[in-house]
Image (tube, helix red, strand yellow):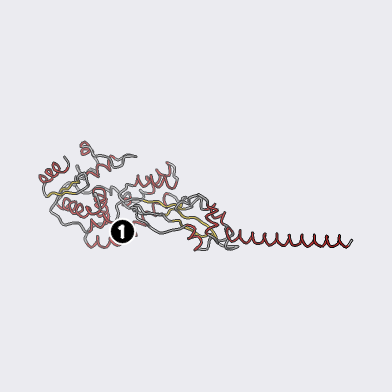
Amino acid sequence: MLKDIKITKSVKIAVITGAIILLILGAGGFIAYNSLFGAPQKQAALQQFTVPLSVDRNGGVLIDFTLSGSLKERGFIKSERGFKYALGKFEVQPGAYKISKSMNVWQIVDTLKTPYMKWVVIPEGLRKEQIAEILASELTWNEQQKDDWLTKYTALNYDYVEGVYFPDTYLIPIGESGSGTASRFIDRFNEKFAPYYDKFTQANIKWDTALKIASLVQREAGSKEDMPLIAGIIWNRLLQGMKLDIDATLQYITGQPGNWWGTVKPEYKQIDSKYNTYLYKGLPPHPICNPGLDAIEAVLNPTKTDCFYYLHDGNKEIYCAKTYEEHLKNIEKYLK
């Protein structure tokens, strides 16, 4: 009987010990799990978290950014290791997301699968139809939304028909209206153009005149180094009352989806359009593209030159001439 009592006590002790061990293991497991995957706070508001573009439109690195490191630094996760495990092989896209410090790692990973704002890169020298194509692709617009952007929201003001949809990198809400997007571009243009406005005024140059010339320079230049010379030649022609004879205006007239800046054919010079600088003197009614700051700067500070003509060879090297006869010789030498 005594032996049975001792066995019973031993069993009870073993059970209790086992329960304690399991409890300790369970608590330890919970603590370990929470330290890897748990939310840093019980309650917290949503905040914007931005995943930047890794490179800009010219291929230069914008920022040294590590996703897990940034989340940890800002207090959205407790453990980079836990986040990387939960993320797996999924690649988070550049953009803006709304996350909270009250989310656990699994909730954050799920949220990072769909940005509410997307980066949209607009290169220099595009016409607004090309910009509309980019916006439609990035913001998932349908044809009606794209058409409204082109025919309504960018046509509300005569001076804003073209040229003021500034080439830059934008972070745009996916659900933003076409009107809002147009205003966003114009606001960026006003911000970037502001330092030049007074300088053009002092030079007795209207801002819209400067923008028209800048658009021609942008499309005609082989590189930004060419821009001041081309601007100087355009100014020379304007001041002498000559026709500008600029091929880019013919490209603007004849551009079509998929071929907005196609090869110029001789017969294009006879197209009756106010944009045709082979038929009509002076500047076109509106800019023919949306120029960048280098082109605008070139219009303000053109190269002083006696040249009235220019061309680019197959390597985009520019050659200018004072007379049409010299220009013809350059054509023979560099283009034929």
The x, y position of residue 224, in whole percent, is 25, 53
Which quadrant does the N terminus fall into? Answer: bottom right
Question: At x 35% / y 45%, what residue is drawn?
Answer: 130
With 23 as the anchor, is 323 left or right in this view? left
Question: At x 72% / y 62%, what residue is drawn?
Answer: 20
Question: At x 11% / y 43%, what residue is drawn?
Answer: 329
**Is the residue marked by circle 1 packed among few (<14), some (14-19), or many (20+) residues within 10 Å?**
some
**Circle 1: residue type:** Phe
Tally the marks. 1
With 320 as the anchor, is 146 left or right in this view? right
Residue in the foreground of this view, choosing between 81 and 7: 7
Residue designated by label 1: 193
Q: In this view, does 11 lie above or below 150?
A: below
Question: At x 53% / y 52%, what residue is drawn?
Answer: 87
Question: Which residue occupies the extreme right position in the image?
Answer: 1
Residue 45 in sight from this viewpoint: no
With 137 as the anchor, is 11 left or right in this view? right
With 278 as the anchor, is 99 left or right in this view? right
Residue in the foreground of this view, choosing between 199 and 86: 86
